[in-house]
Amino acid sequence: MAYTKPIIDAHTHVLHSNDGIDYLVELTDGYGYQRANILAAESYGENGYTGATQNSQALLLKACRPDWWAFGSLNHHDDNLEKQMQALIDLGFDGLKMIEGKPDTYKRLGSHPINGPEYDAVYSLAESAGFPLLMHVGDPPELWDVENAPDFAKEHGWLYIGEGYPTLEELYAQVEDILTRFPKMKVIFAHFFFMSDNRDRAAAFFDRHPNALFDLTPGTEMFLNFAKDPAAWREFFIKYQDRIVFGTDNWDVLTEQEQKDKDDINRMLRTFLEKDGPYEIWGWKLHGIGLPEEALDKIYRDNFHRVVGAQPRPLNRPMALEFVRRRLEQADRYGCTEQEKADLKEIVTEMEEM
């Protein structure tokens, strides 16, 4: 029987123009998720620091849909990370999204370790304020392997060979240091922390760090890995049902093919969690783990509520409007495209009219 209680999608994005805000809401409703969490990622982008509208778009979505959560992000055009972090808290964001541990972003930002001293004040504030982080750290292990990396990864520049890229083990070691020094900090690691190929390692990580969680956002490779031993993975999910969060990585897709892929991925996720038995997507032979309702309640909703809050934090609307105005005034400094400048103008106008 399909799960019919409310579901929160803890991991979504607006990656394109402001039209993507409405599209994302429509997409979320269409999949039957009652509410969602939008993640900004301003340090991400092909040309260094593009995507400079993402915090502003997240603020607009939060203003339009106060029942949704939003995680802001750091922008490395401004090197005062502590001040930025405090501003995100004061604006009414619900947490911090960090993309700095994704290897291509890591390299573009100068290959600074994510446990480096420039981040200490950010983690300290997160810990003291109970302000959760959702961190993308690493990528699938095969992206460091020229022979086994999939074609789509090569096309996107996600092949991490050469100077400036961290190894996956280096990133894991940096996380160990962060969580050792800031043990009360609440952290959700995106994409199952890229440990779906090593169940024992994932379990040991959870045992060492009681405030760490994983989200289930694909990487689709994780479902191939889960299918290798579904019985053992079912035991894992039941044992650690308090430590796993549902997320899709849905975004404002642009093409029919992207939409079809999203349909398949969302079906892949739900079937894996709810069905006990084999299923097939893209010709892949997968296997669901058919979790009990109590575990589904936690993964689909309760764990996110516990870590982030049962209700979103209220938006500081005057401060949010001033934030977007300043970003528009400094658009060239932040490398905004003409489309991004137009988006910022539109967000200012909409917020002024609210």
Image (cartoon, rainbow, N blue to C red):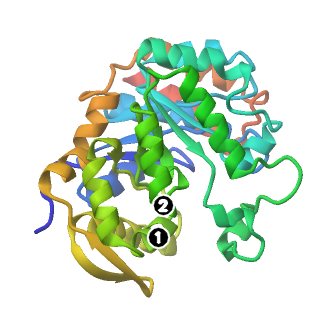
Secondary structure state at the residue bearing disc 1: helix
The reply to whether dot 2 and dot 1 touch (C-beta < 8 Å) is: yes
Name the spot of residue 331 as percent of width and height, x first.
Answer: 72, 29
Report the amino acid beneath label 2: Ser
Residue marked by disc 1: 225
Residue at horizontal 85 percent and vertical 46 percent from the top: 164
Name the spot of residue 251 as percent of width and height, x first.
Answer: 47, 54
Residue marked by disc 2: 196
Q: Which residue occupies the extreme bottom position in the image?
A: 283
Report the amino acid beneath label 1: Asn
155 left or right of 41? right
**Quarter assignment of residue 149:** bottom right
Q: Compute the Cα span from label 2 to label 1.
A: 6 Å
Residue at horizontal 67 percent and vertical 43 percent from the top: 171
Name the spot of residue 295 as percent of width and height, x first.
Answer: 20, 51
Badge 1: few (under 14), some or many (20 or more) residues near its Cα, within 10 Å? some
Which image quadrant: the C terminus?
top left
